[in-house]
Structure formats: C-alpha cells, structure tokens
Amino acid sequence: MKTIVAHIPTVTFMTGIKAAMMLALTVPPCLHAQTFDRSLHARENMEAAIPRPDQDEAVAGKLAAQERKTGRKPNILWIVVDDMGYGDPGCYGGGAITGASTPNIDRLAAGGLKLTSCYAQHTCTPTRSAILTGRLPVRTGLTRPILAGDKVMKNPWDGETSLPKLLSDAGYFTMLTGKWHVGESKGMRPHDIGFDEYYGYYPAQKEISQRFDVRRYPGLVLDPERLAAFEAVGPSDFLTHGFKGGETKELAQIKTIEDMGRADSVLIEHTLKRIGELAKGDKPFFIEHCFMKVHCDNFANPDFVGESEAKYPYKDAVHEVDLHVGALVKALEDAGVQGNTFVFFTSDNGPQMDAWPDAGYTPFRGAKGTTYEGGVRVPGIAYWKGMIAPGRISDDVFDLMDLFGVALSLAGVSMDRLPPDRYYDFVDQTSFLLHDYGLTRREAVYFWWGKELMACRMKEFKAHLKVIIPQAPHMYIDLSLIQDVGLAPWYFNLYLDPKEEMTVGHRLDPWMATVVGKLKTHAATFRTYPPKNVGL
C-alpha cells in the first residue's frame, strides 16, 4: 500500500487528460482488487457493470408482461430542472423548511424510487449532452456551454449516435421541450440531432434576460453600441418550434422580465397538450421536458408572485416548477398512459451559488461548477405507476448518463446499434430502478471538470485528484481555483463525512489504493478511445 501512495504525486501534478493517461501507466494492474470491485466488462468499449443476472431476468419478465398487457413499448418522460439544489425539494430535506414547499415532487418520490446518490455533471451543457449520448463530455467535446462569441472548430454532434435518433428509429415519437443549451447553430439543434420535434429556448434564462434587465446589466442595456455588438453574436431570445427534416419557426420573442417569468408556463402548456395528443397515437413517446427555471436570473411568473413561503424569486421559481411537475403527472393520468410511462425527475447539476440568493440549497460541500458533492449530487426520482414499487429509497450510486441505457432497454433497442469505435460510459440500470429490491449495477462514478480528471466515487468512498477552491463565499465559478491535492488524493468516506471536510486517508480505511486503481482503469480507456476536441 505504501509503495502505491508514493507514486500518486507524480500523477496528480500532471494536468488534464495527460494526467489521466499517466495515471493508467503508473498504477500497476495488480492493484485492481476484484473482491472489492464487483464490475465486469461485457464489452470492451462500454463501462464495466456489476452483474445482477437474477435481478435482470426478473425485470425482463416484468417488462415483457407489461408489453403483452398494453400492446406497446412504454412511454418515457424525463423532467429536468435547471440548477435545482439537492436540498430544494421537501423529500430531500428542503421544501417548506427552505422556503418553498414542493408537494407534487414529494408525492412523486413517495410513489416511486427516491435516489439519494444520483449524480450529474458539474454544469448544464455537460449533463445535457451526456444523458443524450451516454458518453462523458470529455469524450464528445461538449465540456461547457457554447457561449456568445464562441467559435467551435466543428460540430460536436457530428459522429455521435444520439438517444432521440435511436428511439425515433425504433418507432418512438421524440420531443424536447424547453431549455436546450447544447448548440443552436444548424446541425446542433435538437431537431437536427434526432428529436422529431423541439419547442423551447436554446439558451439559459440569464443569457436571454440580460438584454433587457437594466437593474442587473446596466452596462449592457444602457449602452446601445455594446448592446448592438452583443445582439450580433448573442444567443436566440425567441421561442423556437422545429421539426426533424422540416420547418423551424421563431415564435414569440422574450422582450421583458415578465415574458421571461412566464416562459415555463408557455412551455408546460405545449408539453401537456402534446401528451394528450401523442397518447392517442400509434407510437410510444419520449419527451424530455427541460425547465428554464430555476437557473439564474429567476423572475417570478406574474401569476405566481409571492406564492412560496419565502417570497424570494428563486423560491417562487421552485414553487412554480413543483406546480408544473404536478400538471405533468396529471396529464399522464388524464390521457390514460400513467400506467405505461416511465418518469424520471432530476436536476442538471447543483445550485449556482455564485448567484446567491438567487440560488438553491445543498447540504453538501461545493456547488455548481465543482466536483464536490454539492455540485454533482442531485435529486433523482424514478416513477412508474404499477411498475416501480412506491416508497422505495436507495443510496446506491446512479449516474444520469445511465438514463441513456434505461431508455434503450425500455425501447428494446439493442446495444449492437451503438458504434464500436467509441467508448460508452453509461450503465444499463433498468433492473435497479424497476426491481422491487433493485441494487445498482454501477460500481463507480467519475468526475471531470472540462478536460481535468478530478475525482471518483466508488461505493461510499470518494477520491479527489484535483479540487475546486473558492476564493470568496459562494464563488465556486467566478472566483475559484483548480488545484492539485498534493501528496495523496483527498479521500473521503461519504457515510462518515458527506460534506467532504475530513479525509480518512490511511488512518481509517484500507481501500484508497483500490479506488485509485479504479481511476487507472477509467483513464486507460482514453488511450484506446481518444477524446474529441471541438475547440471549447
């Protein structure tokens, strides 16, 4: 063990993907303790998974019986909130106690499976791309938002096999409503990469509202020359309606704070309408409904001002999201498809504390922009009436990328459809979610910040090779540093210390070398399957 640790400094002072590859070269393969690491590779180009043959077989039978009963594949509805903190919903310790009760989200959790170790990427675009590709953003090049003035070298979606395309080819109608944030140029739009229909806004709220929010951005709004320069390169501020292979229309333009505040009401009405229509059709549907809220800058919907307990704009936004979640579930019930629709509710990352108090709550260290738990551990609720037992709670690890595999499995799409020349990081977690006593098939979650390999969680243990250090309270993005950890990884037992404040290191635990060995195995995949560089 001591010899192993002596090699670690030469790795952690390297940077980025080079460090990952050096890690693969400097940690001997014999460190991979099979008795601790239960995962196996079914395919060379796919993430290793824990075999659960009995669990898989039972759920396969359950799904087959469901299909015989309904005569069709199940519908899939993803509900993605923007920047909601782990501790915002009442079922995760927030709700009324943090100023915004969430009865509908809480009811969803009580009726299904609440995941307490569900992981996203550290910011918006990486998560949104990862769940649609089943691949880490460092592999696809979609490591951050494409912002005003950015010039990418090539379309990052070129060569990617997206989930909506696979599902559409399998007979599903696929639609994304709401925030996109993964490219708005032709060839990068939702209806260009596989969705049959798109109805929403390409950027985040702040990127739209800064054009007219004179209180927060006077240097832009009150300077005609700068405003004109921004408009020349700025993101779209139109509600867009597009169809695969068809017309793309710009509908209403966001012109005021009130317009921005009402955006989610406009979006939810479209999804509710389409659920009713699609339920009557001959195809199952896959809908990804992405809220604009609660990403800063939050402006209360004029119809819901002050309806949260706290009365602050962020808390009113949480209250509104909860109302819309309730409306989505009711729409499934009214359309008669609640019993044949898999629903997953989550957030794309932790709260953006740089915008505090226009930000959410997490009980963990860090926030959006970091790979501490506060940045990447998010709410995750799986709900399927009659198929997922109500009242389940699990702390087994789940990565939002695993939704890619779950969707393929539910749709009956063979993994053979995935190109063999690239690496896939998802794990098919269908049996974990649907079995009454399901256990995770994922052994580890890997955390990257851009091209920097940061950390790994394996079971309850988490090892950091690099960390984000804020230089002022809440400033995890705008005033922070990425630092190497020093002589040895920062190694935490999350059961003893979920706030990642005191390492256990060599003093209290013997497994650090094994977790580092898991990182070594992960790093080795980048030698065989090099990542793309799109210029971000």
Image: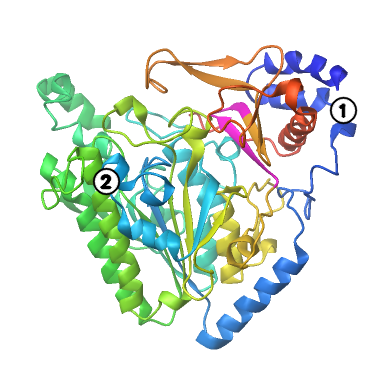
Q: Position of residue 329 (x, y in %)?
A: 35, 67
Q: Position of residue 43 (x, y in %)?
A: 77, 53
Q: Residues within 10 Å of mark 1 (few under 14, many from 20)?
A: few
Image point (43%, 32%), residue name: 368
Residue 28's label in the rendered image is: 1
- Viewer-proximal residue among 71 and 198: 71
Considering only vertical position in the picture, is 498 above or below 52? above
Q: Residues within 10 Å of mark 2 (few under 14, many from 20)?
A: many
Residue 328's label in the rendered image is: none
Which amino acid does the dot numbered 2 rest on? Ala
Per the image, the residue denoted by label 2 is: 100
To which quarter of the image does residue 26 belong?
A: top right
The extreme right residue here reads: 30
- Viewer-proximal residue among 236 and 7: 7
Considering only vertical position in the picture, is 278 above or below 153? below
Which amino acid does the dot numbered 1 rest on? Pro
Whether residue 155 is visible: no
Considering only vertical position in the picture, is 339 above or below 34? below
